[in-house]
Image (tube, rainbow, N blue to C red):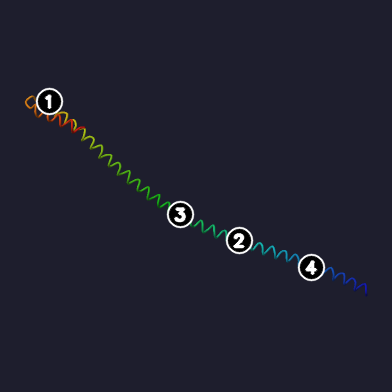
C-alpha cells in the first residue's frame, strides 16, 4: 500500500508539474495576445491617421485642380484678348503705313507745286517735325 501511495504521490507530483507548465504556457499566450492587441491598436491608430492625411491631401488636390482649371480659363481668355489686341495693332500699323504713304504723296505733290512755295516750305517743315 505504501508503494501504491508513493506511486500516487509521484503521479500527483508529475501532474502538478504539468499543471504548472500549462499555467506558464497560458500566461505566455495571454501575454502574446495582449501584445498583439496593443500592436493591433497601434496599427489601427496609424491607419486612422493615414486615412485622415489622405483625405486632407485629396481635398488639397481638389482645390489645386479647381485652381488649375481657373488658371487655364484665365490663360485662354488672356490669349484671346492678346490675339484681338494684336489684330488691332496690325490694323493700326496698316493704317499708319497708308497715312504715311499719303503724306509722302501729298509732300511730293506740294514739292512739285511751284505756285505755292510758301505753303510747300511750311508743309514740309511741319511734316518733318511731326515725324520726329
* Cα–Cα span, label 3 and label 2: 27 Å
- Packing grade of label 4 (10 A; few <14, some 14-19, many >=20) is few
Q: Earlier in the sequence, mark 4 or mark 3?
A: 4
Residue drawn where x is 21% and y is 34% of the image: 96
Which of labels 4 and 3 is toward the front?
A: 3
* Cα–Cα span, label 2 and label 1: 99 Å
Q: Are marks 1 and 3 in contact (CB under 8 Å)?
A: no
In the rendered structure, find residue 60 and report the number of the disc placed on it.
3
Task: In the rendered view, tell whether residue 12 sits above or below residue 105.
Answer: below
Mark 1 lies on residue: 111
In percent of width and height, residue 109 lies at: 12, 27
- Packing grade of label 2 (10 A; few <14, some 14-19, many >=20) is few
* Secondary structure at numbered mark 3: helix
* Cα–Cα span, label 4 and label 2: 33 Å
Residue 30 lies in what quarter of the image?
bottom right
Image quadrant occupied by the C terminus: top left
Residue drawn where x is 76% and y is 66% of the image: 24
Q: Earlier in the sequence, mark 1 or mark 4?
A: 4
Q: Are marks 4 and 3 in contact (CB under 8 Å)?
A: no
Q: Earlier in the sequence, mark 2 or mark 1?
A: 2
Q: Earlier in the sequence, mark 1 or mark 3?
A: 3
Outermost bottom residue: 1
Which of labels 4 and 2 is toward the front?
A: 2
Amino acid at each position: 500500500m505504501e508503494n501504491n501511495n508513493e506511486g500516487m504521490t509521484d503521479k500527483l507530483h508529475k501532474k502538478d508539474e504539468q499543471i504548472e507548465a500549462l499555467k506558464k504556457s497560458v500566461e505566455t499566450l495571454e501575454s502574446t495576445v495582449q501584445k498583439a492587441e496593443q500592436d493591433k491598436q497601434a496599427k489601427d491608430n496609424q491607419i486612422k491617421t493615414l486615412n485622415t492625411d489622405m483625405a486632407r491631401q485629396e481635398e488639397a488636390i481638389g482645390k489645386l485642380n479647381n485652381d488649375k482649371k481657373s488658371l487655364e480659363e484665365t490663360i485662354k481668355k488672356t490669349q484671346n484678348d492678346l490675339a484681338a489686341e494684336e489684330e488691332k495693332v496690325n490694323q493700326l500699323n496698316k493704317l499708319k503705313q497708308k497715312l504715311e504713304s499719303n503724306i509722302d504723296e501729298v509732300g511730293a505733290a506740294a514739292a512739285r507745286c511751284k505756285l505755292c512755295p510758301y505753303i510747300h516750305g511750311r508743309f514740309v517743315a511741319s511734316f518733318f517735325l511731326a515725324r520726329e
